[in-house]
């Protein structure tokens, strides 16, 4: 078996997304406030406190869950998601256009993997930047990245070969 050369690699983790962090912190804060506002802290009020702690622990653990793993080889871009998700491979020989784009105008975006919408396929975990790859069939792949300049430079160098 031949060993393939990795030209670019990026791992993005689910818990490092602003949307995920904000959502779990708001839920934890709600539980803590409800706990301290409750006057008679009997058995049920303690559930609110432990619920807040649970949201914080889950938020912390989600920082270690890999959501999107992007690799660029000599012949393809490989996108790998969570455990049960299929790998997506984009053949470099079919790419006709590459460009830098902002991922979205919104401040918080939900992480997505292989989301088909409006003639494009989205791969995103966090950040504001993305690379738009268009293939011969006119399919657009929007790949969110934290390393936009490096990703674009490597793709352009491999496409021109």
Image (cartoon, rainbow, N blue to C red):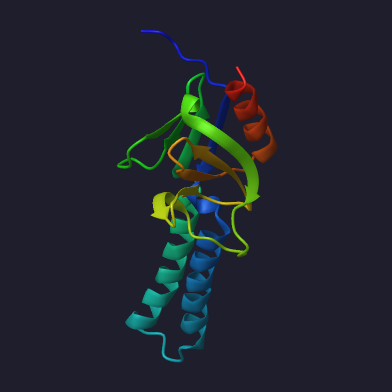
Look at the image and tell me in which quarter the N terminus lies. Answer: top left
- Say above or below: 118 vs 139: below
Farthest-out residue, left: 84
Q: Nearer the viewer, residue 53 or 90?
A: 90
Instruction: Give percent across and percent down for residue 2.
Output: 41, 8
Q: Nearer the viewer, residue 141 or 67?
A: 141
Look at the image and tell me in which quarter the C terminus lies. Answer: top right
- Say above or below: 26 vs 158: below
Farthest-out residue, bottom: 39
Residue sitting at x 41%, y 85%? 41
Numbered circles on residues, count: 0
Q: Is residue 154 left or right of residue 67?
A: right
Q: Is residue 18 left or right of residue 69?
A: right
Please say whether residue 64 is visible from this viewpoint: no
Farthest-out residue, top: 1
Q: Nearer the viewer, residue 34 or 126?
A: 126
Instruction: Give percent across and percent down for residue 74.
Output: 51, 18
Please say whether residue 13 is visible from this viewpoint: yes
- Say above or below: 145 vs 44: above
Q: Nearer the viewer, residue 110 or 25?
A: 110
- Say above or below: 138 vs 45: above
Instruction: Give percent across and percent down for residue 81.
Output: 40, 41
Instruction: Give percent across and percent down for residue 44.
Output: 34, 82
């Amino acid at each position: 078996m031949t060993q393939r050369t990795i030209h670019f690699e990026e791992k993005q983790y689910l818990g490092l997304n602003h949307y995920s962090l904000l959502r779990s912190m708001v839920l934890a804060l709600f539980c803590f406030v409800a706990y301290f506002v409750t006057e008679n802290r009997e058995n049920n009020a303690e559930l609110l406190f432990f619920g807040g702690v649970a949201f914080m622990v889950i938020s912390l653990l989600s920082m270690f869950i890999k959501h999107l793993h992007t690799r660029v080889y000599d012949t393809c871009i490989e996108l790998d998601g969570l455990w049960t998700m299929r790998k997506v491979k984009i053949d470099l020989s079919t790419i006709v256009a590459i460009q830098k784009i902002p991922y979205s105008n919104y401040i918080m975006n939900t992480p997505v993997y292989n989301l088909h919408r409006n003639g494009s396929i989205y791969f995103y975990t966090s950040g504001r930047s993305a690379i738009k790859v268009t293939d011969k069939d006119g399919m657009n792949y929007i790949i969110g990245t934290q390393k936009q300049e490096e990703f674009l430079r490597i793709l352009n160098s491999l496409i021109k070969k």
